[in-house]
């Protein structure tokens, strides 16, 4: 297998950075609040929100938990 060129590596990196970014968070249905660990909200940033949501919900009771997907916001893109 040929070694990727520097240009190919740059193109792959640019594609990752240009892809839309989403935040997926677990929500406790009983309280309506995001799940927190040691006071920090559990959320994952991803370019594949549906896959991440499915993985976060795997083996969880859907009567108790939900996962929300929304566009990620950070300083500079708002």
Image (cartoon, helix red, strand yellow):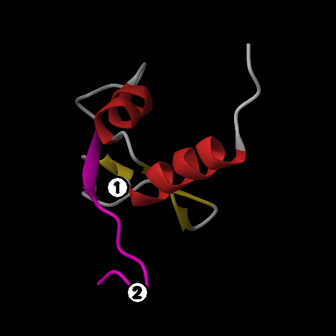
Residue 78 in sight from this viewpoint:
yes
Mark 2 element type: loop
Density class for disc 1 (Cα within 10 Å; few <14, some 14-19, many ≥20) is many
Between 12 and 74, the one nearer to me in the picture = 12
- Range of magenta residues: 65-78
Residue 33 is drawn in which quadrant? Answer: bottom left
Looking at the image, tell me whether mark 2 or mark 1 is earlier in sequence order: 1
Q: Which residue is mark 1?
A: 22
| Residue 69 counted in the magenta span | yes
Proximity of marks 2 and 1: CB atoms separated by less than 8 Å: no
Relative to 57, residue 22 above or below: below
Q: Is residue 41 left or right of residue 6?
A: left
User: Residue at 36% of width from left, 39% of height from top?
Assistant: 48
Q: Is residue 29 left or right of residue 24?
A: left
Q: Residue 14, percent across and down?
A: 50, 56
Q: Is residue 62 left or right of residue 3?
A: left
Q: For the N terminus, give its image quadrant.
A: top right
Q: For the C terminus, give its image quadrant.
A: bottom left
Q: Residue 52, percent across and down?
A: 40, 35
Q: Nearer the viewer, mark 2 or mark 1?
A: 2
Between 62 and 74, the one nearer to me in the picture = 74
């Amino acid at each position: 297998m040929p070694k990727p060129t520097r240009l190919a590596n740059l193109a792959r990196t640019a594609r990752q950075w240009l892809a839309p970014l989403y935040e997926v968070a677990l929500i406790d249905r009983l309280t309506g609040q995001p799940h927190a660990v040691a006071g920090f909200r559990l959320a994952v940033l991803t370019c594949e929100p549906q896959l991440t949501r499915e993985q976060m919900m795997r083996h969880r009771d859907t009567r108790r938990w939900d996962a929300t997907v929304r566009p990620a916001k950070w300083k500079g893109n708002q």
